[in-house]
Image (cartoon, rainbow, N blue to C red):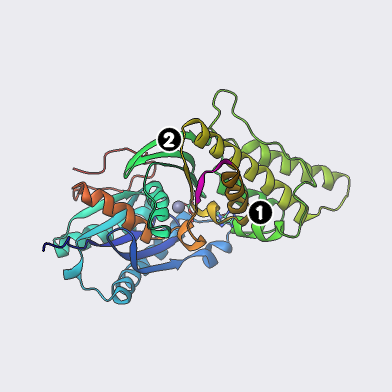
Amino acid sequence: MLTKKDVTILAIESSCDETAAAVVVNGRDVLSDEISSQIDIHTLYGGVVPEIASRKHTERINQVVRKSMETAGKSFDDIDAIAVTCGPGLVGALLIGVSAAKALAFGTGKPLIGVHHIEGHISANFIADKTLEPPFVCLVVSGGHTNLVAVKGYGEYEILGTTRDDAAGEAFDKVARAIGLGYPGGPKIDKAAKQGNPHAIEFPRGKVADSVYDFTFSGIKSSVLNYLNERDMKHESVNVYDVAASFQQAVVDVLVSHTVAAADEYHFTKLALAGGVASNSALRAQMKEACEAKGITFYCPPPILCTDNAAMIGCAAYYEYLKGHESSFDLNAIPNLQLGDKIYE
Ligand code: KG4
Ligand code: ZN
């Protein structure tokens, strides 16, 4: 009897401040998932410094790839394709991963598959729940992106809403800096909020007048800054825990209401979260509750698969591989790559 051959992909991710490599079989079985984080270095500067990120990727990429192959117990003969995030992201950071992947693909003669970073984040859900199949609606919230995406099939997406200004994670990072929690802001606000009252301060829930599914976070962020300034001028103290909890609640309210409304209108029975902000404990809990109330099945990867990793890139690449998609050696780092842009021959 003929058995379907397993497809083993070596994937690389370097779009921001994590140097990552993973070996993934048939899209959903992760044999290794190496992540070398640069957080400690960027913390010194209060945010990601692109030049430093590129330099650190250069220093670490070879070790991370080697470790991922060793942990997986694979040699290059076992690999069917080399996948890499080619955008969006920091151009210098992306270039390191793309160059490494091209060199490996050229040296081994294996096909090269460029992957859109957001497609990777969405695909983390396929690793976390092996039974999940499209269609579903996915909220992708990270440091650089806020997208409400209709996942119609593997690699088939329609953007229903996006942010008009800051990304959700960016708002978390900026507010955390303003209240003195430092970088990276998301996890610090999440932790501080647990000790605060989410209803202590009414920050605005941003709405975009001409689009129900678009997001805006600049109003929430400005009103936090105004609140802090007013307190300062009156020489009144600030309860950082209450500010963190109230800010987080305002963002979570908007994310939950938009996503559940989209699921309702487009008749999706499945709803998924993705991206670094999807590791936020309040967002996970409140989205789950809202889904349960509507009879929608809720999916959310564990935090390690929400933040940047290469396993999700290997998963997305598998479904492109099955479609016969392959990138040429002209593949470049594309900092503003849009979902659906051509990256295959
Ligand atoms: O997906 P990711 O690792 O990188 C990008 O593609 O941007 O997301 C990083 C973002 C940062 O803004 C970080 O503050 C945010 O995700 N983040 C969180 C949490 N953990 C990470 N935001 C809120 N709550 C968290 N627990
Ligand atoms: Zn990301």
The residue that label 2 is drawn on is 159
Q: Residues within 10 Å of mark 1 (few under 14, many from 20)?
A: some
Q: Secondary structure at mark 2?
A: strand
Q: Amino acid at mark 1?
A: Arg
| Along the line of sight, the residue nearer the viewer: 264 or 155 | 264
Q: How far apart, in angstroms, are the residues tagged by discs 2 and 1? A: 30 Å
Image vertical order of residue 324 relative to residue 79, above or below: above
Q: Which mark is residue 291?
A: none
Q: Which mark is residue 177?
A: 1
Q: Is residue 239 left or right of residue 84?
A: right
Q: Residues within 10 Å of mark 2 (few under 14, many from 20)?
A: some
- Residue lying at the far left in this picture: please name it: 1
| Along the line of sight, the residue nearer the viewer: 322 or 248 | 322
Rendering coords of residue 211 (x, y %): 54, 26
Q: Dividing the image into 4 quarters, which one contains the C terminus?
A: top left
Rendering coords of residue 236 (x, y %): 88, 50
| Along the line of sight, the residue nearer the viewer: 85 or 45 | 85
Mark 2 CB lies closer than 8 A to ligand 2: no
Q: Amino acid at mark 2?
A: Ile
Rendering coords of residue 250 (x, y %): 68, 43
Residue 75 appears in the picture as rendered = yes
Rendering coords of residue 82 (x, y %): 24, 59
Residue at the image point whose x is 50% and y is 30% from the top: 265
Q: Which residues are magenta?
A: 294-298
Image vertical order of residue 147 relative to residue 96, above or below: above
Residue at the image point whose x is 31% and y is 38% from the top: 341
Q: Is residue 4 magenta?
A: no
Image vertical order of residue 164 relative to residue 116, above or below: above
Residue at the image point whose x is 85% and y is 44% from the top: 233
